[in-house]
Image: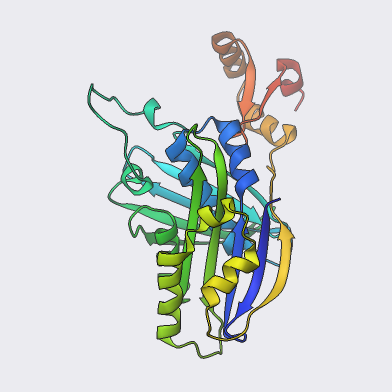
Amino acid sequence: MDVLAHYHMFDYRARCAVAVTTEIVRALQQRHGLDPLTTIALGRAVSCAALLASSLKNGKEYVHLSFAGDGPLAKVVAECNGDGHCRGYTVPVQLLSVLNLDEGDVLPESVGAAMGASGFVTVTRGLAGESQSTYNAVCDFANGEIAADFARYLTESEQIPSAIAAGVKLASDGSVLASGGMLVQKLGGTVLEEQELIDVEQRMALELNLSDRLVAGETTEDLVRLIQGAGGGYGLLMQRPLIFRCTCSREKMMQALVAFSEEQLKEIRDETGKLEVRCQYCAEARQFRLEELLRH
């Protein structure tokens, strides 16, 4: 089961969120037909969105992450709300669909190489159905590797010292074995020495191997215990399930079509043989009859 677990660390001087997103990433891979690299990119982004959502209080609140670069992997989008409902997509879903490779050429070997040399992270916080409550922040890429870009956003835009890890482990056939992320942040009004955070970052970089540990069956508490080290006490504050769930509906999709005139709708139907809308987040497609659209 996918889960988001929230801990205190260093005797309440820091907090740690751990997200296990394996089942969500499996669902997204199957729905969108992702290739291995887009699967890894989206898995990292969904894990980061879930980690950021660990501070949300209810299901109306949500966070939306968009990573947009100048490489062949143009965009990676992930979203999570306060109830732990996650969704996301990539553009394109498969890199081969946009790369004109000659014989001997190879695909990008990393997410950062696929995202490109420059780009932006956009973080949106809001309340569902209340656009006036939306808040956006933008930050330059660190290196396009998703977790590092997210860490840079937290440091530069929210000015919170943070350590981030996010990983996806694939089997030899490209299927998802494990996906997850970890976030450690200093708590406001407390004293966390710079060296303590550096030690955490080093353990996350050198010892964590997050996706491998999840494949091995380690729990969120096992991971926190490893990262905590000998620097004080830790404890569980909150835990909730994470699931894939999209907010699209037939009514919302209908609104995308009723904006067209009758002539335009007939032209779409004649060209494509149907009046259909496909959700970018969940890949669900719904078809409509001209008569029902004209009644709205």
Q: Residue 275 at x, y = what percent?
A: 64, 18
Q: Residue 197 at x, y = what percent?
A: 45, 79
138 over 71 or under it: above or below = below
Number of numbered discs on residues: 0
Q: Tell which of 294 and 140 is nearer to you.
A: 140
Residue that appears at 70% across and 74% down: 236
Residue that appears at 65% across and 73% down: 7
Along the horizontal axis of the image, is 124 left or right of 248? left
Q: Tell which of 81 and 176 is nearer to you.
A: 176
Q: Residue 17 at x, y = what percent?
A: 60, 67
Q: Residue 48 at x, y = what percent?
A: 53, 58
144 over 282 or under it: above or below = below
87 over 106 or under it: above or below = below
Rendering quarter of residue 260: top right
> Which quadrant of the rendered structure holds the C terminus?
top right
Q: Tell which of 149 and 128 is nearer to you.
A: 149
